[in-house]
Every structure is written in structure tokens, then in C-alpha cells.
Amino acid sequence: MSRLLLVTGASAGIGAAVARLAPSQGWERVVVHYGRDREGAEAVAGDIRAEGAEALVMQADVADMSAIAGLFARISELPSGPLDLVNNAGIVSPGGPIAERTPEVVRRVFEVNVFGAFEVARLAVAYMRAHEGGGIVNISSAAARLGSAGMYIDYAASKGAIDTMTLGLADELAAEGIRVNAVRPGLIETAIHAKGNDPDRLARIGHTPPLGRPGAASEVAEGVLWLLSDKASYVTRTILDVTGGR
């Protein structure tokens, strides 16, 4: 049975890099999920198809629980088989100190990064139980352990929740053979910095990791897909830092 990979937030950045790399690592079908950027998702899907794999572009707002249910309803209509999940969709609010972290700002970050990720994981597990298993990699952030003071403390807190979810879910599902891990990227060359109103962030601090440079989304993708692969068959409940030593 061909392997199916669902990558949420796959229209850009780390999600796009994971989806593009997947065919070369053995995935024959990839669901390219997006929230708003259909053009980006279609570009990713075109690259996947060029590698000889099947790409299915699906939209859903992961802050909307009914939309996530609709996403999995569409996935359930596909030919059955194991499902691997890269739980990647996430947002960052404009950077600033705690005084600017209003309830509305924090709520939106948690609706996408935590509540959405939980619901995606919940429905993915239900699918896996009915369709020959699979694995999960949650995308966290080094901010979860660094705190991101004065900039993205709400984002950091949301990713701390993802770390904890990963540990608990790994324990819960281990007896069923469903492995759950996470990846914590560091300073990575993606558009997330511009979305946080700090497009020059990497120019200022990209040299600060011990390796002396920011990372590429493709380097994160390698770690994500390794964790889902049979090469990591004895790895679960692990949070992999891809941070250049930061």
C-alpha cells in the first residue's frame, strides 16, 4: 500500500520543504495542506508531481475545528493506507513585549498553533487506527526552550505546549506502534520573520548559532522525514533540535 503523507501548512517555508522532499524519501502520495496561500500550495504540488509522486492540494483553516474535520473527510475518501502526519501549520504574531500581547493576539496564536495542532493530531490518530497505522512529527520551535523574551513570547509558549503534547501522545500511542516525535527548528531562512514584522532578524542574529549561520528549510525537512522513516523505527518521544547548536 502506498504511503500517504499529510503536511499541514505546506504552501511555504518548512512545510513546503518537507512536502517537496517527501517523494525522494519514499512517499508516493502527499497531501499539500494550506490555509490561505493556494498559489504557493499549487507550486509545491507541481514540484511533487515532477518527481513522479501524487500531490493533492487541500485547504482548511486549522483554527476552525469544522474545517479540520472537513479536511480529514476528504482524506478518508482517498485510497486507504498508512498515514504519516507532519503537524506543521502555525503562525507568529508581530513581535513585541508582553504589554503588546493582548488577549486577542494570544488567542489567535493558540487557536492555530495549539488548538489546531491538537485537533489535527486527534483526527490523524483516528485515521491511523483505521488504516494500518502511521507516524507523527510535530513542528515545535527552539523558542519553546529559549522563551523569546520581548519578541514572540506567545509563540514560544504555544510551541512549549506542542513539546508537551508530543511527549504525552508518544506515551499514549507507543503500544499501538504509532511513533510521535517533534522537531524544534532554530533560526531558519523562511518568511516567518517577515510575518512577525521583523524581516531583518536573520541579518542581525543569523550568525549567532555555534555553527555561525541560519539554517535552511531543507535541512529541517531532512530531520522531519528521517523521524518518520523506517530508519528511525526505534525513535519515539524525541524532540530533535535543528538549530545549528543554538
Image: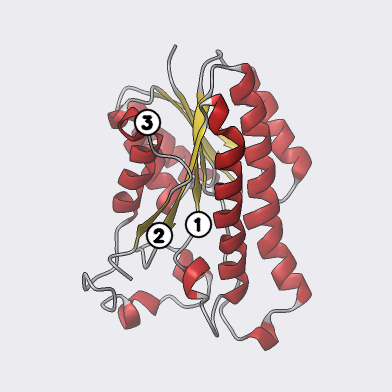
Quadrant position of the N terminus in the picture: top left
Name the secondary structure under disc 2: strand
Amino acid type of the residue tagged 1 in the rendering: Ser
Instruction: Choose top left, top right, bottom left or bottom right for residue 205.
Output: bottom left
The reply to whether the C-beta atoms of the residues labelled 2 and 1 are less than 8 Å apart is yes
Which mark identifies residue 233?
A: 3
For disc 1, the neighbor class at 10 Å (few under 14, some 14 to 19, many from 20) is many
- Comes first in the chain, label 2 or label 1: 1
Residue 6 x %, y % = 51, 34
Task: Please name which of the two marks, 1 or 3, marks the residue nearer to the observer.
Answer: 3
The reply to whether the C-beta atoms of the residues labelled 3 and 2 are less than 8 Å apart is no
Residue 84 x %, y % = 49, 31
Q: Nearer the viewer, residue 200 or 116?
A: 116
Amino acid type of the residue tagged 2 in the rendering: Pro
For disc 2, the neighbor class at 10 Å (few under 14, some 14 to 19, many from 20) is many
Q: Is residue 28 left or right of residue 73?
A: left
Instruction: Choose top left, top right, bottom left or bottom right for residue 150.
Output: bottom right
Which mark identifies residue 140?
A: 1
Above or below, 234 against 143 in this view is above
Task: Please name which of the two marks, 3 or 2, marks the residue nearer to the observer.
Answer: 3
Which residue position is annotated with label 2? Answer: 185
Gap in angstroms between the C-alphas marked 3 and 2 = 22 Å
